[in-house]
Amino acid sequence: MATSNNSPTSIDPSFFYEVAQFAHTGMAGLIYLSIGHIAQRFHFFSWLWFGMLISCGVGLAALKEFWYDEKYETPVTRGSSLKDFTFYILGIYIAAVVLAL
């Protein structure tokens, strides 16, 4: 867990924040890219279904960031829910662009 003191086991908050945002973007993008790639590979891909999946993902990301994190994460590790949500959306957007190419 990140702490604000300067003990040898503490994590620099700015580094922790960068890693967390990279993880939000990367995991959301990887999940959607994997699902889309598998669907394309087996000829089940449809932009309609992918759009519905994106809508569900946006809803789950909002639920996770604005309800779960606010209720269960500590203020030290939580950071900004809006920024975390934005990085989830960025990952989903990157996956959709890659699949469209």
Image: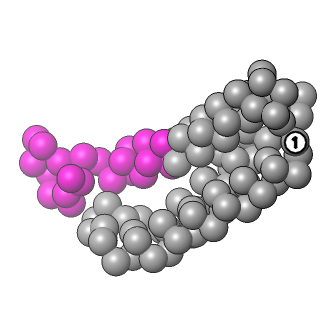
* Residue closest to the far top: 41
Residue for badge 1 = 46
Quarter of image, res 82: bottom right
Question: SS for tag 1?
Answer: loop
Residue 18 seen in the figure: no
Residue 21 seen in the figure: yes
Quarter of image, res 44: top right
Q: Is residue 66 left or right of residue 49?
A: left
Tell me the colour scheme of the image.
Answer: one colour
| Range shown magenta | 1-23
Q: Is residue 40 left or right of residue 30?
A: right
Is residue 19 part of the magenta span, yes or no? yes
Q: Which sits in the foreground, 53 or 79?
A: 53
**Which residue is at a point 49% across and 68% down the rendered structure image?**
65
In the picture shown, does residue 83 fall above or below 71? above
In the picture shown, does residue 23 fall above or below 3? above
Is residue 40 part of the magenta span, yes or no? no
**Which residue is at a point 41% across and 65% down the rendered structure image?**
79
